Image (spheres, grey):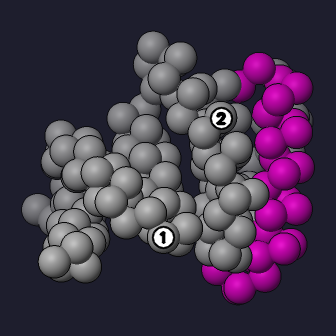
């Protein structure tokens, strides 16, 4: 992978994040797809999985969970195949799957995945401490909120 190729993929990803934050989901998806195309061609498996998960998140946010599914499942498969897959990235991809399941109305499956996500985030306390500069594990807090919400819906 050349520096220019790497930079181009990063540039598309950064622009996609900005567009997503601005609510321009179609444009964001277009740029994330460009990042994916570049990463497919350069052998950066971890970067490809990361970009696939971000595209899935954009599609889920755009209420297109069926379109997000193959991208998200490919990301999860790539992470599973990577011996050194970043634990936070894997947890985030699983979080995305929990959100996708919730959006399609499969609350029982979403609850099951959220419980797994919570365990993964809990194992990353040190990472969250560094990220937040304190003792807050935002991943566990979010997972706990979703678990409580979904458990209450089942009663």
| Distance from the alpha carbon under mark 2 to that under mark 1 | 22 Å
Q: Nearer the viewer, residue 128 or 52?
A: 52
Label 1 crowd (10 A; few <14 / some 14-19 / many >=20): few
Q: Which of the marked residues, 2 or 1, is nearer the chain's N terminus?
A: 2
Q: What's drawn in magenta, residue-wise?
A: 18-44
Element at badge 2?
helix
Q: Nearer the viewer, residue 79 or 108?
A: 108
Where 121 sits versus 99, above or below?
above
| Residue 41 within the segment the image draws in magenta | yes
Reading the image, the residue beneath label 1 is 105
Element at badge 1?
loop
Magenta segment, prevailing SS (helix, strand or loop): helix
Q: Nearer the viewer, residue 94 or 50?
A: 94
Instruction: State whether residue 141 appears in this view.
Output: no
Residue shown at 43% from the left, 38% from the top: 90
Measured from the top left, where is residue 58 in percent x and y?
67, 66
Reading the image, the residue beneath label 2 is 74
The image quarter containing residue 43 is: top right
Residue shown at 81% from the left, 46% from the top: 35
Residue shown at 88% from the left, 26% from the top: 41
Measured from the top left, where is residue 30 in percent x and y?
88, 62
Where 149 sits versus 94, above or below?
below
On screen, residue 132 versus residue 89, left or right, reads left
Residue lying farthest to the left in this orientation: 135
Question: Quadrant where the N terminus lies?
Answer: top right
Measured from the top left, where is residue 148 in percent x and y?
17, 73
- Total numbered badges shown on the rendered structure: 2
Residue shown at 19% from the left, 45% from the top: 119
Residue lying farthest to the bottom in this orientation: 22
The image quarter containing residue 126 is: top left
């Amino acid at each position: 992978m050349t520096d220019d190729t790497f930079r181009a993929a990063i540039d598309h990803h950064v622009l996609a994040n900005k567009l997503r934050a601005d609510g321009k989901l179609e444009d964001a998806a277009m740029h994330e797809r460009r990042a994916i195309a570049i990463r497919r061609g350069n052998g950066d498996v971890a970067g490809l999985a990361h970009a696939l998960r971000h595209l899935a998140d954009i599609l889920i946010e755009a209420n297109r969970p069926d379109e997000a599914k193959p991208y998200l499942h490919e990301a999860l498969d790539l992470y599973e195949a990577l011996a050194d897959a970043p634990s936070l990235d894997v947890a985030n991809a699983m979080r995305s799957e929990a959100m996708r399941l919730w959006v399609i109305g499969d609350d029982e499956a979403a609850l099951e995945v959220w419980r797994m996500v919570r365990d993964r985030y809990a194992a990353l306390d040190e990472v969250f401490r560094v990220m937040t500069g304190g003792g807050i594990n935002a991943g566990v807090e979010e997972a706990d909120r979703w678990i409580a919400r979904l458990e209450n819906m089942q009663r």
